[in-house]
Image (cartoon, rainbow, N blue to C red):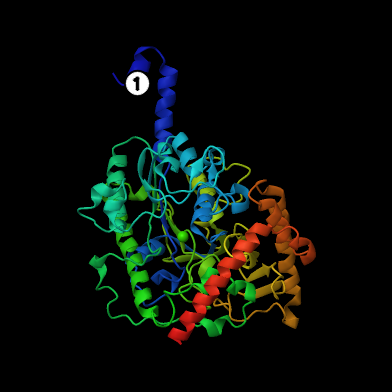
């Protein structure tokens, strides 16, 4: 006798009836597939205007759904961005990043995977999880299964740390190694198996797949070696050093500039081929996932969200890596496909400024759950049937990781980006940048000193000051987040800031930068 029959037999008809109602309601709730890539540049897709790449499944998803053209990762680095995606909070409010600490369990309990599971969703995580969850915040690292919240999911195919492109090296997907030796296709197969399992259950599901690709090392699946064999990659207008002449010294003080190797002129062609080949692998996995949803009759009630944890510089302005607030580092692709809103106009675009803070509230809203009051993001669900709308006027982009001069706060609107570099030591002066995004996507023309742009500059400064006040009010009271609220404040003089910067941090930071400078100078002499 199953539970419902037992309750009816026991005369508990009301409870049995309530269960039936709950089941009916759960059948109406959509399934959710959240697909996250690692370090994927916004312009790496056909649907984002790149005519050299082959991304048919991303492009099909974009044609079926809505593409968000003003989407940014509010902290453009793996760990903080992933914690933001799951909690809907700016980094300063969850306090999780490299060198600052893990995500405390009390915050994790209010993440979208936990809340959806509590609401009756069948849940799976596959791929690179990206941060540690611990009872109290600590800095002991994220390289252990003990720090992964495996018990929070019904099915776990995740791994701690960076994992490996060799499927066999990742414990919870190793069973796919023989058929799919490269982990991108193995994740596609694991997702496919989960969808088959979920189709047999009387509850909605939430599948989160975090691809390792195209994050370095550039080790694409040899299965796809011929895809870009003949492609000669076109460099963007802001490629390499000449485009960086107008950027402040602070921007060029971190490893994104000093350590770049893979996207220098001598290696650009080979690196771009491998980078895009990695994304081609993800594209194939998306095809596998969508085909399985159709096969199981689930496609019409499954929302698919695809994005990246941060952008990637690929040599723009002479930068490698991500982290920085420029478009290539901080902007990311975002596609939302909700099959319940049939698309009458192929390839709808949304200009609203959106961010990784919005993923969690969007997923909660799709599942019919309330959005907690301390979440920074907004639900993007209303923009899917109405992409001409907007969820906010301005949003913050921040970095407090790595080289101290590169720590910054920026504010972005649909039209402008304002960047404030606080650091004024070592011969530098605090610096401002202002870019008109629709007319200057490559950020080649800093308008901050332009006489006709002073009104706009002042408006953007005010928006910046609003974000600083939010930081001070909402930041976690640890890991130097309160101090950074002061350091990034435009109204605090440098002399006062110098006393706030942690002395030990700046000492080790200088040492590490001086090593990188020497190495870059040697490499420059070789490659130029
Ligand atoms: Ca990343």
Q: For mark 1, does the 10 Å Cα neighbourhood hold few (<14), some (14 to 19), or many (20 or more) residues?
A: few
Q: Is residue 270 above or below residue 481?
A: below
The residue pinned by badge 1 equals 3
Circle 1 sits in a helix, a strand or a loop, which is it?
helix
- Residue most extreme to the bottom: 528
Q: Is residue 483 visible?
A: yes
Q: Residue at left 60%, top 57%?
A: 391
Q: Is residue 394 visible?
A: no
Q: Residue at left 33%, top 50%?
A: 299
- Residue most extreme to the top: 10
User: Which of the 4 image quarters holds residue 27?
Assistant: top left
Q: Is residue 52 above or below residue 460?
A: below
Q: Nearer the viewer, residue 280 or 293?
A: 280
Q: x, y (%) of residue 416?
A: 64, 71
Q: Is residue 274 above or below residue 16?
A: below
Q: Is residue 50 left or right of residue 375?
A: left
Q: x, y (%) of residue 308?
A: 45, 60
Q: Is residue 525 left or right of residue 245?
A: left
Quadrant into which the N terminus falls? top left
Q: x, y (%) of residue 359?
A: 51, 52
Q: Residue at left 63%, top 58%?
A: 392
Q: Is residue 308 left or right of residue 433?
A: left
Q: Nearer the viewer, residue 13 or 335?
A: 335
User: Which of the 4 image quarters holds residue 53?
Assistant: bottom left
């Amino acid at each position: 006798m199953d539970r419902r029959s037992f309750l009816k037999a026991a005369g508990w008809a009301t409870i049995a009836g309530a269960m039936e109602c709950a089941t009916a309601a759960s059948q109406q709730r959509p399934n959710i597939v959240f697909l996250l890539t690692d370090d994927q540049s916004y312009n790496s897709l056909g649907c984002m205007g790149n005519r050299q790449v082959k991304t048919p499944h991303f492009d099909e998803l974009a044609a079926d759904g809505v593409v968000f053209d003003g989407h940014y990762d509010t902290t453009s680095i793996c760990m903080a961005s992933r914690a933001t995606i799951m909690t809907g909070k700016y980094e300063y409010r969850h306090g999780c990043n490299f060198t600052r600490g893990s995500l405390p369990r009390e915050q994790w309990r209010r993440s979208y995977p936990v809340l959806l599971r509590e609401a009756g969703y069948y849940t799976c995580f596959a791929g690179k999880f990206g941060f540690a969850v611990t009872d109290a915040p600590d800095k002991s690292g994220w390289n252990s299964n003990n720090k992964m919240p495996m018990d929070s999911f019904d099915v776990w195919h995740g791994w701690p740390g960076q994992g490996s492109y060799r499927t066999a090296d990742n414990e919870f997907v190793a069973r796919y190694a023989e058929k799919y030796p490269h982990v991108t296709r193995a994740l596609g197969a694991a997702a496919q198996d989960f969808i088959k399992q979920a189709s047999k259950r009387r509850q909605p599901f939430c599948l989160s797949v975090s691809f390792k690709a195209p994050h370095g090392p550039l080790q694409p699946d040899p299965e796809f070696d011929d895809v870009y064999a003949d492609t000669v990659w076109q460099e963007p207008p802001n490629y390499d050093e000449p485009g960086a002449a107008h950027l402040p010294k602070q921007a060029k003080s971190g490893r994104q500039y000093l350590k770049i190797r893979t996207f220098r002129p001598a290696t650009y062609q080979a690196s771009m081929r491998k980078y895009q080949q990695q994304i081609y692998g993800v594209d194939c996995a998306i095809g596998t996932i969508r085909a399985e949803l159709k096969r199981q009759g689930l496609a019409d009630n499954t929302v698919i969200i695809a994005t990246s944890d941060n952008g990637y510089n690929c040599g723009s302005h002479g930068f490698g890596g991500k982290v920085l607030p420029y478009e290539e580092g901080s902007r990311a692709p975002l596609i939302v496909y909700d099959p319940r809103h049939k698309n009458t106009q192929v390839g709808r675009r949304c200009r609203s400024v959106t961010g990784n803070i919005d993923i969690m509230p969007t997923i909660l809203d799709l599942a019919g759950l309330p959005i907690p009051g301390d979440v920074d993001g907004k639900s993007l669900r209303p923009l899917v049937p109405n992409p001409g709308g907007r969820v906010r006027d301005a949003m913050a982009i921040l970095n407090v990781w790595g080289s101290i001069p590169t720590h910054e706060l920026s504010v972005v609107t649909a039209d402008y980006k304002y960047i404030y570099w606080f650091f004024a030591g070592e011969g530098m002066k605090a610096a401002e940048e202002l870019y008109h995004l629709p007319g200057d996507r490559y950020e080649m023309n800093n308008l901050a000193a332009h006489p006709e742009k002073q009104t706009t500059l002042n408006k953007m400064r005010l928006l910046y000051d609003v974000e600083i006040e939010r930081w001070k009010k909402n930041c976690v009271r640890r890991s130097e987040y309160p101090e950074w609220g002061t350091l990034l404040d435009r109204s605090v003089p440098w002399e006062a800031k110098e006393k706030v910067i942690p002395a030990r941090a700046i000492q080790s930071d200088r040492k590490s930068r001086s090593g990188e400078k020497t190495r870059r100078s040697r490499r420059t002499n070789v490659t130029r």
